[in-house]
Image (spheres, rainbow, N blue to C red):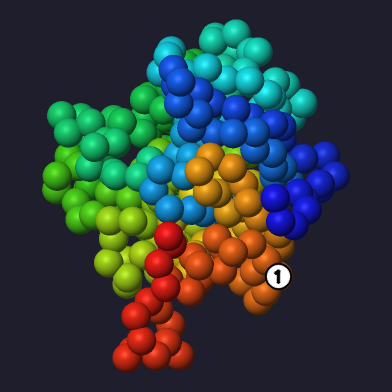
Amino acid sequence: MTGETPTPHEALLQVDNLRIRFGEHTAVDGISFDIAPGQTLGLVGESGSGKSVTSFAVMRLLAPSARLTGAIRFRGQDLLALPEDKMRGLRGREIAMIFQEPMTALNPVLTIGEQIAEAVRAHHPKLAKAEVRERVLASLEEVALPDVSRRYGDYPHQFSGGQRQRILIAMAVVNQPALLIADEPTTALDVTVQAQILKLLRRLREQHGLAMLFISHDLAVTAQVADHVAVMQHGQIVEQRRAEDLFRNPQHPYTQRLLAAAPTMRTDRAAPLATLR
């Protein structure tokens, strides 16, 4: 692997030599990284490189057929050894996730207010109904969803794609987690809405001191949010460095090809783009 793994003091999340296998197929092959409180690590690579599988492993949401070795430590606790009831107590409260496609992540037959309220009640069962509603409305206001009191009772199909993504973010941060995992949160959005969502994630991180694992195939998007970047290829991290250093002077040939494959204002439009093969 090119570059050194960042070793921040008192890392919030530590992934150590993680391997994930499905039968004879190795999806993730011995990766390690740390995320400190308030830090964003961008995990980038092409489809099939192992990014999302890694995020699901952190959340302990992989199918029973997955075989994991190594360690995933959150505040010193090895999540892979944690009993399921203890993991449920962390999932959604201390560690939250924004999934890739909001229309499939949201339940179409429940109002958006009720879905976020479920996330609150799961971890705060003694809260009064009025207080739960207050927390939900505050979360929706925080992600700048318009007219939240009126739209509390609306269903997912009544919102635009960008608004649905804001609702998912509200659901993820309503319990004020320490770590937020964002799995391709802007993939299905147009560039204007994409910029708004990235700005929102940066603001939430600054306001709440969130640590973030930001997963994307898009290096340009990752550059806007990440402090450090880890580049994955075929289940391995091939380069991991501070974001500004990696984008200014990529060391690994795969990282160089990823950057060359993305057009910029200075790209020669007469020349073919680089490929990843």
Residue 18's image quarter? Answer: top right
Q: Compared to 243, does 204 lie above or below?
A: above
Q: Nearer the viewer, residue 66 or 90?
A: 66
Q: Compared to 275, does 206 lie above or below?
A: above
Judge the density around disc 1: few (<14), some (14-19), many (≥20) Cα neighbours within 10 Å. some
Q: Image check: 272 left or right of 77? A: left
User: Residue 210: horizontal and vertical position, in percent?
Assistant: 62, 47
Where's the C terminus, which quadrant?
Answer: bottom left
Which residue lies at the image location 32% right of the left edge and 91% below the top edge?
270
Which residue lies at the image location 36% right of the left edge and 25% below the top edge?
118
Residue at image mark 1: 245
Q: Compared to 74, does 225 lie above or below?
A: below
| Amino acid type of the residue that numbered disc 1 sits on in the rendered structure | Asp
Q: Image check: 235 left or right of 107? A: right
Is residue 61 something one can see in this rendering? no
User: Residue 101: horizontal and vertical position, in percent?
Assistant: 29, 44
Q: Nearer the viewer, residue 133 or 224?
A: 224
